[in-house]
Image (spheres, rainbow, N blue to C red):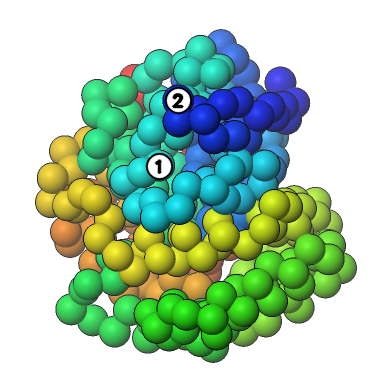
Amino acid sequence: MSYQNAVVTTEDGRALEVASVGDPAGPTIFFHHGTPGAASLLKSFSSSAEQHGVFMVSMSRAGYGSSGRRAGRVVASVVDDVRAALDHFGRDRYLTIGWSGGGPHALACAALDAPRCVAAWSLAGVAPANVDFDWTEGMGPENIEEFELARQGGPEYEAHIKSISEAFADANEANIIAYFGGLLSDVDVAALADDTARSVLAEACRDSGRTGYFGFIDDDQAFMSDWGFDLRDISTPTNIWFGDHDLMVPPTHGAYLSAHVPGAVAVHRPDEGHVSLVSNHQDELFAACLAAWH
C-alpha cells in the first residue's frame, strides 16, 4: 500500500496527522520521526515495508505538520497520540521504532504501553539530559548551540528555532545536505547520495514547520525535562542502535541507554552515522522486527 495520510481528532480535541505505508495484512510497526520532522518521513521506509510485509503507522508529533500543538508536553505524552493513530487504522498490538528525536518516544511506548507495545527500537536516539556525562559532547556545532539555548529558554532561543524552521521551509533535494551543515558526517553524506532519500528528508523538514515552529521547541524542552517515566521501569524488549560517526546524537547516548534500559540489546555500529545507521541496515532492522513479532 502506498503512502496514505489523514488528519484525525484526539480525545482532547487536537488535530493529529497520521500516516501509513506497507501491507495491511502484516504486523504493525509504529514509527516516531526525528526532531524536527513529520509523518512524511515514513516514506523512507515504503519499499522495505512492502518487501517485508509489514504495515507501518506514523504521525506528526504535536506541533509538527498538521498536528495541533500540545503545550507543555513531556516525552510520555506521546503515548496517547500513538494510541489514537493506531486506533484510526484499526491496529492493536505493535512494535515501535524511534529515530533520533523519535527514540525517547519509542522508549515511552515501551515503558507505558505494554503489552500493546511488544518491542521497541531506539535508532540513534537521545538519552535523558540528567546523565552523568556531557550530553552535547561530540555533537556538531549546530546542535551544541541549539541545546545551550534550549537550556536557557527565552526569546533568543525561540528566535533561533524559528529561524531554523523558516530555513527548512525551502528545503529540497539539492540543498538539504547544506542545511544540516556540521551535523552530517561523511558516511551520512554518502548515505544521502540517493536523490529520493534527500527528497524525502527535505519534504519532512518542510512539513515539520507547516503550522509553525512550536513542535520543534516542545521536542527540545521535553528532552531536557523529566521524560515522565524511568528507563529502569522498561520491561518490554528493547533494542538500542547507535554509531560512532553520529554528529547529531553521539554514541555516548546509545551506550548510556544500553546500560540503563533493563535487558536492552545494544547494536553498536562503529562505522555508521546518524543517517547511515538506518539507511544502510533497513533489511536487518525489519528482519529483527519480524523475529520479535513471532
Q: Residue at x 23, y 40 (%)?
A: 111
Residue at the image position 70 percent from the left and 52 percent from the top: 211
Helix, strand or loop at label 1? It is helix
For the residue labelled by badge 2, is the local secondary structure a helix, a strand or a loop? loop
Q: Is residue 290 visible?
A: no
Depth order, front residue of 87/233: 87
Q: In the image, residue 196 lies at what x, y percent? A: 80, 51
Q: Is residue 26 left or right of residue 104?
A: right
Residue type of the residue flagged with mark 1: Val
Residue at left 60%, top 73%? 161
Q: Position of residue 187 (x, y in %)?
A: 61, 72
On residue 78, the disc is 1
In percent of width and height, residue 10 lies at 50, 28
CA distance separating discs 1 and 2: 13 Å
Residue placed most toward the observer, 203 or 192: 203
Q: Earlier in the sequence, mark 1 or mark 2?
A: 2
Confirm or deny contact between disc 1 and disc 2 (CB under 8 A). no
**Left or right: 162 as drawn, with respect to 33:** right
Q: Position of residue 216 (x, y in %)?
A: 55, 62
Q: Is residue 260 visible?
A: yes
Q: Which mark is residue 24?
A: none
- The residue that disc 2 covers is 11
